[in-house]
Image (spheres, grey):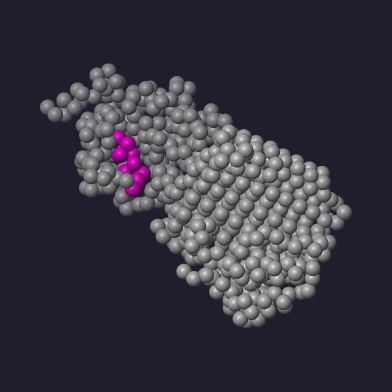
Amino acid sequence: MLEIKDLKASTGDTPILNGLSLSVKAGEVHAIMGPNGSGKSTLAQVIAGHEDYVVTEGSVSYKGRDLLELEPEERALEGIFLGFQYPVEIPGVNNAYLLKAALNAKRKHHGQDEVDAFEFLKLAKEKMALLGMDPKFLNRGVNEGFSGGEKKRNEILQMAMLEPELAILDETDSGLDIDALKAVAHGVNALRSPDRAIILVTHYQRLLDYVEPDVVHVLSAGRILHSGDKTLALELEEKGYDWVREAANA
Amino acid sequence: MTALALPEKALADAVRGLPDNALAPNRAAAMERFLERGFPTTRNEDWKYTDLAAVADISQRWLENGATAPIAESLGDQVAEIRALLDIDWVVLCNGAIVDGMELAAGEGLSLETLSKLAHAPGYEHPLADLNAALLPDGLHVRVRAHSKHDRPLGLLIVDGADSGPGVSQARIHIELEEGAQAQFVEYHTSVGAADHYANSVVEMSIGRGASADFVRIQGRNGNHAQTHRTAIRLDESGTLRYSGFDLGGRLVRNDLDVDIMGRDASAIIGGLYIAGDGQHIDNHVRIDHRVGPARSEQAYRGILGGRCRCVWNGKTIVQPGADGTDAEQSDHNLLLSERSEIDAKPELEIYADEVKCSHGTTVGQLDDAALFYLRSRGLDRQDAVRALTRAFGASIVNHAPIAAVSGLLTDMVEKRLSALTDGDDE
């Protein structure tokens, strides 16, 4: 589904990704771990198409297409979803408006009829119940005045509504209490299917207790140093990242 | 820069050609005052950014043409269209003449009369108000009787335009809310017709003791027309004014809003939204004079600018000696959608009293890239994302308009204007 080869990317004059390769197949859940500044968030932003990051070398193909050719909205319509590490507050843009506009943009793109207000509300309330969210959040500005946990749940709500084929969750687990973490994990697990892939970018092993990954990668200085199964996450939790770096340098 | 004058003889002929009524002596006096000063020029600090040369030019050509211009044919359609948009009672002023609505609401605490019948000579010695008084065929006087309450807004429709030859029109409305009266007004300025047009209007309102006025002004003039509009409001003790102005059209627009707080515990809450695109110049000057305290005033303006345009905002709050307990806020926030748009925003506080709370803030910014990317990453195309963010920027003003009956219309009008602005027509 996603094939990244020797990817190099910079922001301004600062190179951040230094020859990263990653292959994700439909049905898989990958966890990407690594210390601060290793390039985890940059990878997520590059896949979503953020203009601040310039790809200088390498390629990214998604469902056989050159992903780097596509505008951010085209990527979204083709099934990519980024759960933001810091979801943006947009006062005055209603949460319901965004969800409905996003859902209908996607349906239109795939030649489906747009949902009407009634169908939309029914679907949104159903997904919100799943995540333990108060329907009142629909009528608030996007993330406006939301707590950290509420913002993350809101990201998962958007994901649940849009049903992406490739979801990248950028530190969605950071700063969550255990209830919010469980709700997020529940939302992710509900999305798991043989047709979809999920990339979890995380600092901690904690989320992986609830969402079991197929592959765990360690990212450092813009490259994947090491990949393994779920036990790698436990090992990292116990020993930190230094041993991976040392092993890679040896 | 030379003075922007009008030819004396032609102006005098135009004044003499007006209907002979009780306003005639006042016209002559107002004309004399206008001739002494002419139009304000950019040498005047208050007019630094707004050049009335085009307005003087239209007026001159109109005078040369014998001070007549046939009423635009589509004017009737425009009136019908606005009536259909908003189901309220309308008084209609076409090219300054009151053509409809005078029969409204008689005996229900609201009375409408012409200024000539009341022999109310318009005062207010400002050059543009003088020009208005000099060339005014007649004006409207609205009286809201003491303690009467009106839930249904009164519409004041000012519609102008000519199909050929430059047109000039004057409209004048006086509103008097007596003690304890409550009323709502929707003032709608629009214009049609292919000819150049300059509309100069004056509204004077007095809000009596404990009275309250909710006021929405909507300006949706033709993109080739000019407007100068002066509103002077007097607030007595415990009087309340809630006023919102929306400027969506016009080529050259200057609005002056003057509020005099004459009595304690009065409150003036003022909001405004201006949206300008290619070729437009929209200037809003607000002056609030706190003569006594305690009293409260708030000015909250926002501007959305696209294409090659210029907007001006000047908010002045004066706190006179002894007006202790004044609580005054001013803000003006602007969103620039293009590099060729320009805003001159200036808050001014003149404080001569000690116990006051005054604040002001102005900002000029562009669309938030992070928000834009966030929306696009959800599948909204750039245009929809830009529109959602610009709409959101204006929403705080639209949502605070004090008359619920117009909120749907305002939302639609702002949406339509923003669509044109963000569709690339005005970039």
Residue B248 appears at what percent x and percent y? Answer: 57, 59
Q: Is residue B186 visible?
A: yes
Vertical order, B50 against A66 (above or below): below
Vertical order, B26 against A138 (above or below): below
From the viewer's perspective, tell me whether residue A63 is left or right of residue B425: left
Location of residue B129 (image quadrant): bottom right
* Quarter of the image that includes the C terminus of chain B: bottom left
From the viewer's perspective, tell me whether residue B303 is left or right of residue A36: right
Q: Is residue A29 visible?
A: no
Q: Is residue B358 magenta?
A: no
Secondary structure, magenta segment, majority class: helix
From the viewer's perspective, tell me whether residue A125 is left or right of residue B159: left
What residue is rendered at 69% in x and 49% in y?
B234
* Of residues B388 and B259, the one drawn nearer to the viewer in this rendering: B259
Q: Which residues are magenta?
A: A40-51
Residue A206 appears at what percent x and percent y? Answer: 37, 22
Vertical order, A247 against B363 (above or below): above
What residue is rendered at 54% in x and 33% in y?
A128
Residue B354 appears at what percent x and percent y? Answer: 56, 35
* Of residues A99 and B407, the one drawn nearer to the viewer in this rendering: B407
